[in-house]
Image: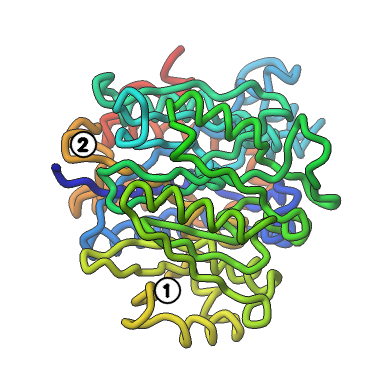
Amino acid sequence: MSSAYEVNFDGLVGPTHNYGGLSYGNVASQNNSQACSSPRQAAQQGLAKMKALMDMGFKQGVFAPQERPDVAALRNLGFTGSDAQVIAKAAKEAMPLLVATCSASSMWTANACTVSPGADTADGRVHFTAANLNCKFHRSIEHPTTSRILQSMFNDEQHFAHHPALAAVSQFGDEGAANHTRFCKSYGEPGVEFFVYGRSAFDARLPAPQRYPARQTLEASQAVARLHGLHDDNVVYAQQSPAVIDQGVFHNDVIAVGNAELLFYHQDAFLHTEQVLAELSAKLGRTGGHFKALCVPRDAVSVDDAVKSYLFNSQLLLRPDGKHLLIVPQECRQNTNVWNYLQQQVGPQGPIADVQVFDLKQSMQNGGGPACLRLRVALRESELAAVNQGVILTPALHATLSAWVEKHYRDRLSEADLADPQLLTECRTALDELTQILKLGSVYPFQLV
């Protein structure tokens, strides 16, 4: 069998990165609302992580940001005139709407879509379903551009299949790969796809959170599995604990992370944990894999510690020696309980051999850690060769993108700056150049006119 890889496509932070406090249920987002941001620093921090992983030998790609502010969204809400007039009217009459349409939240590409590798699907192609993200207005407007970018990145119909976002209604709330993990013996062989949901739209018997919304529904996860042609024997559904959602765990990737044969999770992550683990073990076993679960007890790390540090919003990367590397934000080192746990558990004798710490403060303050910033795509050699090579990170591309950020991005951005019509011009100029750098073609609304 030919080689296969897990490729991480990291979201490039957009020029309008700001702290709008838009994500109810995301503690960091709410706590840093209206703080002054640095789009340039945010983008460079993300690029630094991408380069570091590339230098370690991991396959790394780049996912382009969205056009912001989204003038078309404001027009759909009744604002008229030239682009500059639309922005001015929104700033005067409905500043929260302008802030929402300026969000750079697409940098968290774990929410861009759900991906099933060709080894799992009925037709043998890699399947992508863009996430509707309909729980939050500022994210619900992303999927049309996300779909165009995905189709430009993975543009060979022989190897890739694309599905539009699910119906934008609460019953099919879909947050993409942030609630999806795949377990496998090797990336090119059939695996088990693990879908975690917060509530059921149609089964009132299942418990639901009371304080914060459950963004992913069981019905959305089931629909994605059907669209991707997954066999029931290779799919496991699990409900996230409503109690942890109410403590700020808005996605499963804030309380658990998995890769290959390992699940790293908090004791309070799921309802019916033992049943879930048994099903994962049995189904992965039938593919030839050996499931392992590493549970972090609440006595060592509380849910509050996990949310504040984003311990589980880490990247779990499989090294060639079969051990895992954990990529964590610097907030983990700053949290005594989390760092003590990692010092005790991480080492050559355990399933996680090493931990690497990264400064992602600009993203973290808006509620997104290392795992939020990347979309994982398992690709066989032939599939990787069919990817648009313009988005695969190389030393030369990293240098080009770093210079591009320095040229186009502002160092500081406040809420008041979002009303500056020049910001839209800056954003469009930067993105037009970016599509040429990444060989994406015309993917943005201003390029499609």
Q: Is residue 159 above or below residue 25?
A: above
Q: How many marks?
A: 2
Colour style of the rendered protein structure: rainbow
Q: Which mark is residue 129?
A: none
Label 2 crowd (10 A; few <14 / some 14-19 / many >=20):
some
Residue 41 or residue 157, whichever sits in front = 157
Quadrant housing residue 26: bottom right
Residue 339 image point, x, y percent: 53, 83
Residue nearest the viewer, comparing 230 with 82: 230
Is the N terminus in the top left, top right, bottom left or bottom right quadrant?
top left
Q: Determine the image quadrant of residue 377.
A: top left
Residue at the (63%, 45%) spot, across then down: 417
Residue 388 visible in the picture = yes
- Mark 2 = which residue? 389
Q: Residue furthest left?
A: 2
- Which amino acid lies under the numbered mark 2 shown in the image of this protein? Gln
Q: Which mark is residue 357?
A: 1
> Residue 413 location in percent, x, y?
59, 52
- x 59%, y 59%: residue: 254
Q: Position of residue 199 (x, y in %)?
A: 73, 41
Q: Position of residue 280 (x, y in %)?
A: 49, 52
Res 271 → quadrant:
bottom right
**Amino acid type, mark 1:** Val
Q: Is residue 209 left or right of residue 260?
A: right
Please give the name of the residue rendered at 21% of the width and 36% of the height, measured from the top-left corner: 389
Residue at mark 2 to residue at mark 1: CA–CA distance: 29 Å
Q: What residue is at 46 percent from the left and 12 percent from the top?
A: 449
Say few, some or many: other residues with alpha carbon within 10 Å of mark 1 (under 14 / 14 to 19 / 20 or more).
some
Label 2 SS: helix
Q: Secondary structure at mark 1?
A: strand
